[in-house]
Amino acid sequence: MPEIRPFRALRFDPEVVGDVGSVVAPPYDVISPEQRAALIARSRRNVVRIDLPASEPTDTDPDERYRQAARTYTAWRSDGTLRKDPRPSLYVYEQTYTVPGSSVVRVQRGFMGRLRLEPFSADGGVRPHERTLAGPKEDRWKLMRATSANLSPVVGLYADPSGRAHALLATVAVRPPALDVTDDDGVRHRVWMVPADGPDAAVVAELVSIVGASHVDIADGHHRYETALRYRDERRRTPTAEADPAFDFILALLLESTREELTVLATHRVVRGLGDAGAAALLGDAPALFDVKPVDDPAPLAAAFAPAALAPGGDGRFGLWTRQGGAFLHARRDAFLPWLPPGGDALRRLDVTLAGAALDRLVGLDEAVVAQGSRIAYTKSSAEAIARVAAGTDGADAALLLDPTPIAEIAAVAAAGDVMPQKSTYFYPKALTGLVLNPLEQ
C-alpha cells in the first residue's frame, strides 16, 4: 500500500523574492520558449531557471544547462531565496478555477507530501495509467542528478468514498494560507503548511492513513516518477549512512478521486503529413469503423468538442475535420474488434484507444509511427486543432477531436495493469511549480 510522509519543504521566501506569484511557473512540459522568457523577465528568480534550464549560445556541452541549474539552485539556497521549513509537514493545496471555455467554477483540494517510490504494478501501491517516452525521462534524469531535488510534484489519485479526507482538508482551508497566488490563467492557488508534530498531528496522521488504505494512480508526472525510480536505484548503489533516505520518496500531490470534482480535458489529435489525398481517404473510409454524419462547417465540431461542452466522455464520439470537409463520428465497436491492441476491456474500450486504432486502420499510422512524435500533434483546444488544419500548420491535414477520458476509466485501466496511449488525459488545472520543492535530504 502507498506510504506518505510529511517533509521539510523548500519554499521561496517572500522577504527575498517579493511577490511569490512572480517566481512560480506552470509545469515545465507546457511552457513555450516565449513563455519561459516572459517568466524570467518577470523575475530573475523564477523557478524556470532551475526546472526548465536552457542552453546559452556559448555552451559547448548541451548538458551545461543542467549544471547551471544546479549552481542556481545552490546559490538560491545559500542566499535565502529558498528556505527550508523548520518542521516536517504536509501541505494542503487548493485550486479555484473556471473550467476552460465555460462559466463553471470548481474548487479542487488535495495535499502534498512525500510518496515512497515503488515499481509500477497492477497490484502494488502505486499504479501508472499512461505510456512514457525516452526523451522527457532523460531530460528529467539529468536535472534530478544535478539538483538532487524534486522541483515539481507528480499528481496521484486515491479513493476515499467515505469523504473523510475531503472533510479534513476543508477544516484546514478555512485558515489563513501560507501562500496565495493567482496565475496567468486566473487560477487561484492556496497552500497551508500542516506540521506533523503540532496541534494538527492527528489531521496529518489520518490523511496519511486514508491514502495508505487505497492505491495511488499516477495522473500526471509519469516521466518524473520513472526518473525518480532510476535515480533511487542509482543512489542505492552508493553506500549511505541513511537508514531511510529521502531519495526513496518523490514529491506528490494527492487528490481524492471519488468526492473531489476533478476536471480532465480532452487532448485532440492533429494528424500531419497525410496530404490532401490521405486526408480525403481518412474521411472517405471512416464508415468502415464509424457511423458518420457529414458536416460542411467546422463550427459545430469546434463547439461540440470544446471544454465548455463538459462532455462526460467514454461514449465513442469523435469529430473529424479536413480541408475537404468533416463529420461527426460514432464508433461501431464491433467493427473495431480486429484492430484493437492487446489488453483488458478497460483499455480496449477507451476513446483514445479507438482513436489510435482508427488512425492505424484508415491511414496506416500505427503505434510505432505515432511514437516517433512527428506525425501527430496534440492540443486541448478543438478550435485550435481545426485552425491548424485550415492553415496547414506544420503539415497538419486532419483534426481528430475527442471527448475527455472519464476518471473512472483511468482507474480501471491502472487496476488492470494496462497503460493508455500518450496524451490520453489532460488534468486541469496543473499544479504550479515553485510553491513547494522537495530537497532529497532529511
Image (cartoon, grey):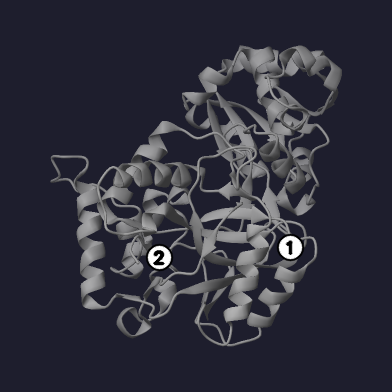
Q: From the top left corner, tell me how far across and down residue 205 is, in percent.
A: 60, 72
SS class, disc 2: loop
Q: From the top left corner, tell me how far across and down residue 384 is, in percent.
A: 61, 42
Query: Residue shown at 44%/58% (left/top)?
Result: 152
Q: In front here: 104 or 281?
A: 104
Instruction: Please rate how many residues cluster around mark 1, counting C-alpha atoms within 10 Å: few if below 14, some from 14 to 19, many from 20.
Output: some
With respect to residue 229, does 321 lie above or below? above
Q: In front here: 440 or 41?
A: 440
Q: Which residue is mark 2?
A: 437
Instruction: Tell me if I can see residue 237 in this picture.
Output: yes
Across the whole image, how many numbered discs are drawn on residues? 2
Q: Earlier in the sequence, mark 2 or mark 1?
A: 1
Query: Residue shown at 62%/14% (left/top)?
Result: 278
Instruction: Tell me if I can see residue 150 in this picture.
Output: no
Badge 1 amino acid: Glu
Query: Residue shown at 80%/38% (left/top)?
Result: 314
**Relative to residue 187, is residue 42 drawn left or right?**
left
Q: Which residue is mark 1?
A: 260
Distance from Cα at disc 2 to Cα at disc 1: 24 Å
